[in-house]
Image (cartoon, rainbow, N blue to C red):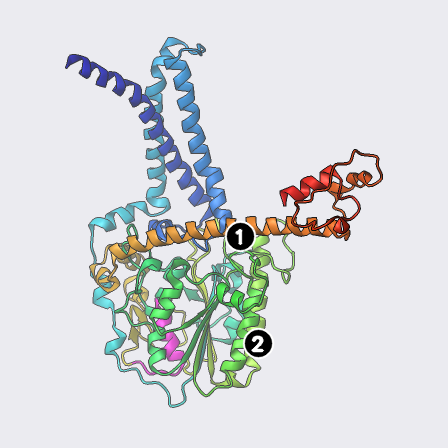
Amino acid sequence: MEQNKDNKKSIGKVLLPYLLLFLLGLCCLFRLSYLFLVSNWEELTVDEILFHVFAPMGGANGHLVQLFITTALAPAILLWLSLSVFYYFFYQKQKIRIFLPKIKKAFLPLCGFFSIFFVAVTIAEAWDGISLGSFLSSQFQSSKFIEEHYVDPKNVDLKFPEKKRNLIYIYMESTELTFMDKEHGGDFPENLLPELMALGEEGEDFAGEGEKRNGGIALPGATWTMGAIFGESTGLPLKISIEQNSMDSQKHFFPSVTALGDILEEEGYNQKFLLGSVGYFGGRELFMEDHGNVAVEDFSYWKRKGKFPRNYWVNWGFEDEKLFLYAKEELENMGKAEQPFNLTLLTVDTHFPDGYVCRLCERKHPKNQYADVYQCTSRQVSNFVHWVQQQPFYENTTIVISGDHPTMDHDFCNGVEKSYQRKVFTTYLNAVPTVEEKKYREYSTFDDFPTTLAAMGVEIPGDKLGLGRNLFSTTPTLIEEYGLKHVKKELEKRSDFMISLGKIDKESAFIKKEEKKKEKEEKKKKEVAEKAKAEQSKKKRNAEEVMNGKHYPKSLSRSIACNRGTLPLTSPRRGSKLLKNKSQEPAGSDCPLLQAILLES
């Protein structure tokens, strides 16, 4: 018995150091992962990190995944393996004798110290840097703020005009008011969005008098694309138990919530959602189909239509130039029908990091690609709007343009003052009402929900829907009523009300995740098999062309000498499928090299 105890202690002594080294590797990965996040994302929150960590990776930017592997995962693994190998030879084999005895004794304690150090420093930086402190406190504090101020559209008697207006809603990826100059409400030395600024002046952005433009504040739960779409469509933050779920794995997307698409569907609208990326990413397709039966026309849809080669892929799918072209085609058809329509677009060229430079971009900033992309997008959106304004259906059409959320690019806004409140670009064009009081409003993207309907001429008793308030009215927004700091603090807390609305099926999420994993593996196997088959067919086809005398590959250029007797000859390959008889054998068929090629085929 004592011997067994001694053996267990001996095994423990051997394994414990390696477990400690493994822990150091994990702590190093924790530290490097945090640095990766804050160096590639701006205005990052814990909720946002958790959403994307647990959401399906299909459709994600491969460059970012590769960047994480090279800057965080690989270095952490390399550190762990290096220290483990070093420990094995230095301590157990004692083949390396370069340290003093005191340093030798301090090796493992030092590993433990650095493990604690990596975690402590990271938590300290993340406490305010990504609002880790607020997130942790929110897990232990609940709030009824959302429940107390939420106005359910089901309980509001909305009245549409006799002639229902069309709606074109443009979500602009990561587009902020910030990128204008200070004279026009931004905080950049140069106005990167002059065309959008002009549209803001032409339309209504609730800036009051003067040249400064205005926009919506992206509140917690609406600071990434899916959260932004949900927020602007329902007037609610996207608060879910993201640790165990991703919305793409659910059968329904907040089924009890009434969204803009639900309201328009009930009024008989023809609804379509166009985007240049894959629709299922982040649950966008599920949301659109679940709320209004909106037809999703994404990258895959246009690929099936044969709009571009099957192997075409840039940035997140296809560029915005194509998106606006396809949108015009859809509008030409939708505009001819008597049925009112809702066409929603989601741009993608301005996605971080640094955006996508398409053929329309002008390179005016050699050291700042992102600036060129924003200027290009500003022109493209403006040109698209001007095209719409020339169409017969425009007279009865309202256009809403809104940034989805502030950019997450890590250095593009380095020059922005800390005191400056970043807002997304917002404007309403060809709206039915005018503002009751011409003044500068403080509002969030949640207010876009009722304001969009009001812009279409819909009467809203009370001027409230979701957490949003109709900006054309004098009804104060939640930010105006309670202050931005208080609203943000309450939204960051756990909401049992939102949990009840979400109806998240955790078991379904797990099952769907496993199914997708299997489908991905099967798809990969199929692609490998098809590739191998294609290579085999190509090799066989090349050999047939050689045998038929059409051409000789470079690899056979020297073997032509076989014909001329300068190289030894061998007997012809009678058993070859390609050589039925001697008369079919072209010159050079006795060449050993050619026979080797045929045998491989």
Judged from this view, the residue extending furthest toward the bottom is 162
466 or 357, nearer to the observer:
357
- Locate residue 472: give its quadrant: bottom left
At horizontal 48% and vertical 86% (from top left) the residue drawn is 337
Which amino acid, mark 1? Glu
The amino acid type found where label 2 is placed reads His
**Residue 535, percent from left and from top:** 60, 49
Magenta span has 417? no
Say which element carries label 2. Answer: helix
State which mark lies toward you, 2 or 1. Answer: 1
Say which label, 2 or 1, has the lower sequence index.
2
Reading the image, the residue beneath label 1 is: 530
* Residue 201 horizontal side relative to residue 566, left or right: left
User: Badge 2: how crowded within 10 Å, few (<14), some, or many (20+)?
Assistant: few
Residue name at image x 44 percent, y 42 percent: 36
Q: Position of residue 418 (x, y in %)?
A: 43, 50
> Horizontal placement of 515 versus 571: left or right?
left
Location of residue 367 in the rendering, given as x and y in whole percent from the top left corner: 61, 49
Residue 587 in the image: state x and y as whole percent: 80, 46
* Dot 1: element: helix
Question: What distance separates the C-alpha of mark 2 from that of mark 1?
Answer: 46 Å
Residue in the image at 25% along x and 76% along y: 154
Residue 365 lies, with reference to residue 590, above or below; the image says: below
Circle 2/circle 1 CB separation < 8 Å: no
Query: Looking at this view, is 502 or 443 the one in front?
Result: 502
Is residue 194 at least partly visible in the picture? no
473 relative to 560, above or below: below
Whether the magenta-drawn stretch holds residue 457 is answered as: yes
Which numbered tag is attached to residue 386? Answer: 2
Of residues 556 and 264, the one nearer the viewer is 556
Magenta range: 446-460
